[in-house]
Amino acid sequence: MTKIPLVFWLVPIASVVALAMAWYFFKTMMKADEGTPRMREIAEHVRRGAMAYLKQQYKVVLIVFICLALIFALMAYVLKVQNPWVPFAFLTGGFFSGLSGFFGMKTATYASARTAHAACTGLDKGLKIAFRSGAVMGLVVVGLGLLDIALWFIILSLFYQGEGTALITITTTMLTFGMGASTQALFARVGGGIYTKAADVGADLVGKVEANIPEDDPRNPATIADNVGDNVGDVAGMGADLYESYCGSILSTAALGATAFAMNGDMQLRAVIAPMIIAAVGIFLSLFGIFLVRTQEGASMKELLHSLGRGTNTAAVLIAVATFIILYLLKLDNWLGVSFSVVSGLAAGVIIGQSTEYYTSQSYQPTKKIAEASQTGSATVIIKGIGTGMISTCIPVITISAAIMLSYLFANGFDMSMSAASISQGLYGIGIAAVGMLSTLGITLATDAYGPIADNAGGNAEMSELGEEVRSRTDALDALGNTTAATGKGFAIGSAALTALALLASYVEEIKIAMARAVNAGEQFIDATGKVFNPSTATMPDFMDFFQVNLMNPRVLVGAFIGAMAAFLFCGLTMGAVGRAAQSMVEEVRRQFHEIKGILEGKATPDYGRCVEISTRSAQHEMIFPSLLAIIIPILVGIILGVGGVLGLLVGGLAAGFTLAIFMANTGGAWDNAKKLVEEGYYGGKGSECHKATIVGDTVGDPFKDTSGPSLNILIKLMSMVSIVMAGLTVAFI
């Protein structure tokens, strides 16, 4: 049995505190008044539609999970090329990921009407209900994530003796439950994104452009489906997504720590638990930040952003300070340098968030210029938006590049020798930088989950025909939500880039373990000079030499091209899926306007259920192929091109996927807020030609920012996770 240090128990304690506070915020929200009978009725429609969709999605995902678990069991127990714990770790990762999305979405569907009703009293009250309901999502994700990690660490420590290779086996085994989380997250993101954007496009193009009725007007048949989609895509999908990033960053760093300090048992154990302790402390600081969020009546957009920033920035500063104390008390080698690696990740998260806010908020020039372009039509809105989105990738890419270099150099003491020890310690620094970026996820995810709650609150206020003053408050909360959602997407892809890079190193270690397993079974690996390759003692440079991982190896180059292509192929498939689903929705809304007499006069009730059914059916059907493709590509590349091809695949997918995701999220967010700016009265206001031009831009941007873009950060991590889990199969074909 591996000895578990006393300080480790802070990890399960923090997870329980997070879940308890999530329950407290949920119960507090439920005590608030849901409003008039009409408000309750609308909220019930949305709740019923969201739960029906999620139930259907989980049925499809369950079938996929059972099939994959059986494959892993075959690899583990029959072919003997896989760790026997993997099938179980895979299932728990998917289960907890899905559970976090379910709890967050359930809270959001109860919170929207209560937020709208609270806005009747004041802006601050509406903000608190929406934000603390979003905090349920954040706290559930970090609580379940750390609980899953703690339980697996305790269980595996009972079965593996000592330190050294035992900790490497424990951490790499734990890492495999990340594939379950990634698989669940991809289905949730893709399916939810297709659902919400099919409804959104149908509601906008037919309702706002053709029928010239307001957004969220009860006469629009697609309105309920649109509100349902906000919850299944931007709450359940985002929750599952960041659950996977959160766990992946902690687990990959723990695995890198086990490898980097393998020759020093006591130090190795400290390096393994360090990211878990940082995440645990981050939970307590996130809670402190949540209670700091408040605002005043009549607050401007910048003041509202400052209100949220006060909570998130305070938590970030405090975790930066706490990291130095934690690593010092753990007596980790080069604790000061590793602490600065964490600060590098935190700083990168803040900079990417601020950059995203600048390029997507209507308070700043880029979005104002897009709104100004509406004076010459929808084409110039789209051209300006695409150009702005492309330019917006510069700061995040430079920032994440700087964070990678700094975290690497801080952790290895600025050792540029490229020795095995310096590489291992530097990679540990990159992993722990990702942990730093995600350490305060409890509050940063709250700002993201807040967005769809505020959006639904605005929809409820519109459909319930509440007063103009209430609607103006919910509009302010909704506009704030658009910016926080865009910021959250930038934050998610930034953390995914660091996590995916750490997973690359973990893949190398998993290949070495699979090779050692094959050697124990009697196989031999001969290098180019005829010398027997020993994976148990091989360093990272030895490994790279054996597999010829360099830019002159055509397998590596071909893998990189396939990885870059996979990002674009995935986006094309998901964009096409949204287009087909939206086309069905547009035709249905037009049909109802034409065939159900009296809808536009408010004398007849639209068939909301039919639109919900179209979105549900389209999402379930369209999400399967892109999601399975993300699993199949790494397996085929591993079998055909080998280890070098897989490493090229992961690097190409990471570089192209990260840049493309930033571009799509920022472009879509800017188009959305340009429309909001016109709706505030600029350039003719609602119903004007400029308004219609920005609606077209917003419609094009919907799948950019809510389907294809956010799904890319899961794609690059899932391909890494699949490669790690299938390492044994890849080795079998060497």
Image: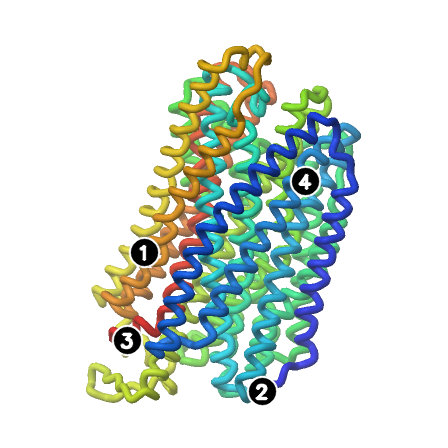
Disc 1 marks a residue whose amino acid type is Gly
Disc 4: which residue: 110
Coloration of the structure image:
rainbow
Quadrant of the snapshot with the N terminus = bottom right
Mark number displayed over residue 1: 2
At 76% from the left and 50% from the top, the residue drawn is: 291
Gap in angstroms between the C-alphas marked 4 and 3? 51 Å
* Mark 1 Cα shell of 10 Å, populated few (<14), some (14-19), many (≥20): many
Answer above or below: position of 554 versus 131: below
Q: Secondary structure at mark 3?
A: helix
Mark with earlier residue (2, 1): 2
Disc 4 marks a residue whose amino acid type is Tyr
Badge nearest the viewer, 3 or 1: 3
Mark with earlier residue (2, 3): 2
Percent position (x, y) of residue 600?
A: 54, 13
Answer above or below: position of 683 versus 128: above
Gap in angstroms between the C-alphas marked 4 and 2? 46 Å
Q: Nearer the viewer, residue 548 or 99?
A: 99
Left-right relation of 134 to 660? right
Badge nearest the viewer, 2 or 1: 2
Quadrant of the snapshot with the C terminus = bottom left
Disc 1: which residue: 563
The answer to whether residue 547 is visible is: yes
Q: Nearer the viewer, residue 455 or 408?
A: 455
CB contact under 8 Å: marks 4 and 3:
no
Q: Secondary structure at mark 1?
A: helix
Badge nearest the viewer, 4 or 2: 4
Disc 3 marks a residue whose amino acid type is Ala
Disc 3: which residue: 732
